[in-house]
Image (cartoon, rainbow, N blue to C red):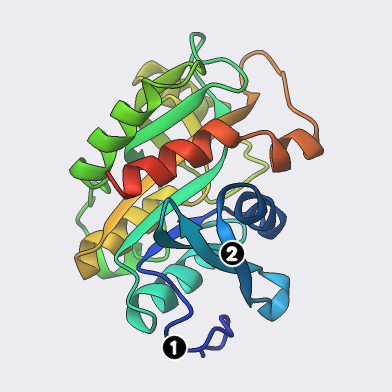
C-alpha cells in the first residue's frame, strides 16, 4: 500500500491504463476487462484490475493535471513495479483538421513546466512516447473507423488558460491537441526505464468551440481504450 493507492502487493498489473477521471476508469474496466476487481478507492481515485484477452491489466485513475498524475505514476512504478503506463484521456483539438471524437496518439508532449522541471534546471528535456507502444497503437488504430492523428501535443499546467498568444504558437508549430498530464508521464517513464504512451480522444476544440457533454466524455471513448489495450500487448 502507498499513501494514495490501497492495493495489496500483486494486485496491480505490470500494464496500467491511466484515465484522469476515476469514473472513466470504472467504465473502462467494466466494459473491456474480464473479472475486473476494485483494487483502489483511496480518496475516491478508483483502480481496477482484470484481464484483457488473458493479459492482466490495471486501470487506475490519475486525477487532473501533472502533479496528480505524477503521484500515481511514481507510486505505480516505484512500489507496484508497473512496466507499461498508457494515459487514456480527453484533450482539446488545436488544428483545423482534427475533429471532435478523433483520436490523437501523442508522439511527443510539449510543456512549459512540470513537476519534473526542477531537476533539469537549464535543460529543456523533450518528453516522448515509447516507440514500440507508439508503433503498435498506430497499427491498432488502422482497424478503427475513428479518424486518428499522430504527432505532438501540448501538456498545459492550467485548464483555464489566458495565453491566446501561446495557443497561436502551438497551432503554428503543428501541435494537435492540448491536455494536462502526458509530459510528466513521458518524463517519469524515461527516468525509470518504463514504457509510456498517451492516447487521447478530442472532446472539445479550441478553434471551433465545439464540446462533448460530460457523460460522453466519460463513456463514449471506446476506440481509444481498445487501441491502448491492443498496443500494450502487441
**x and y percentages locating residue 225 in the rendered image:** 51, 41
Side of 189 where 34 appears, left or right: right
Work out whether 63 lies above or below 135.
below
Residue drawn at the location 23% of the way across and 70% of the way down: 192
Query: Label 1 neighbourhood size at 10 Å, few (<14), some (14-19), many (20+)?
Result: few
Q: Which of 203 and 165 is in front in this view?
A: 203
User: Residue 217 got which mark?
Assistant: none
Q: Can residue 15 be seen in this view?
A: yes
Query: Label 2 neighbourhood size at 10 Å, few (<14), some (14-19), many (20+)?
Result: few
**x and y percentages locating residue 111 in the rendered image:** 39, 45
Between disc 1 and disc 2, whose residue precedes? 1
Q: Nearer the viewer, residue 174 or 41?
A: 41
**x and y percentages locating residue 136 in the rendered image:** 27, 36
Residue drawn at the location 66% of the way across and 68% of the way down: 46
Residue drawn at the location 72% of the way across and 18% of the way down: 210
Q: Is residue 111 visible?
A: no
**x and y percentages locating residue 56 in the rendered image:** 42, 64
Residue drawn at the location 51% of the way across and 35% of the way down: 224
Side of 176 where 132 appears, left or right: left
Q: In which quadrant of the rendered image does the C terminus lie?
A: top left
Q: What element carries label 1?
A: loop
Q: What element carries label 2?
A: strand
Residue on which disc 2 sits: 35
Residue on which disc 1 sits: 9
Q: Quadrant of residue 99?
A: top right
Amino acid at each position: 500500500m502507498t499513501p494514495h493507492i490501497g492495493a495489496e502487493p500483486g494486485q496491480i498489473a505490470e500494464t496500467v491504463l491511466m484515465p484522469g477521471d476515476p469514473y472513466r476508469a470504472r467504465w473502462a474496466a467494466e466494459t473491456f476487462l474480464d473479472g475486473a476487481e476494485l483494487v483502489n478507492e483511496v480518496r475516491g481515485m478508483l483502480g481496477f484490475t482484470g484481464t484483457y484477452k488473458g493479459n492482466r491489466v490495471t486501470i487506475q485513475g490519475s486525477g487532473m493535471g501533472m502533479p496528480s498524475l505524477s503521484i500515481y505514476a511514481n507510486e505505480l512504478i516505484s512500489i507496484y513495479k508497473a512496466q507499461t503506463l498508457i494515459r487514456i484521456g480527453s484533450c482539446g483539438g488545436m488544428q483545423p483538421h482534427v475533429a471532435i471524437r478523433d483520436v490523437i496518439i501523442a508522439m511527443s508532449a510539449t510543456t512549459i513546466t512540470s513537476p519534473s522541471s526542477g531537476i533539469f534546471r537549464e535543460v529543456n528535456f523533450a518528453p516522448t512516447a515509447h516507440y514500440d507502444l507508439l508503433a503498435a497503437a498506430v497499427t491498432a488504430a488502422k482497424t478503427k473507423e475513428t479518424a486518428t492523428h499522430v504527432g505532438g501535443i501540448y501538456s498545459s499546467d492550467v485548464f483555464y488558460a489566458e495565453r491566446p498568444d501561446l495557443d497561436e504558437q502551438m497551432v503554428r508549430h503543428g501541435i494537435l491537441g492540448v491536455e494536462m498530464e502526458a509530459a510528466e508521464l513521458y518524463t517519469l517513464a524515461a527516468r525509470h526505464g518504463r514504457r509510456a504512451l498517451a492516447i487521447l480522444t478530442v472532446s472539445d476544440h479550441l478553434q471551433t468551440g465545439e464540446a462533448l457533454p460530460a457523460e460522453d466524455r466519460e463513456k463514449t471513448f471506446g476506440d481509444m481504450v481498445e487501441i491502448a489495450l491492443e498496443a500494450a500487448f502487441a
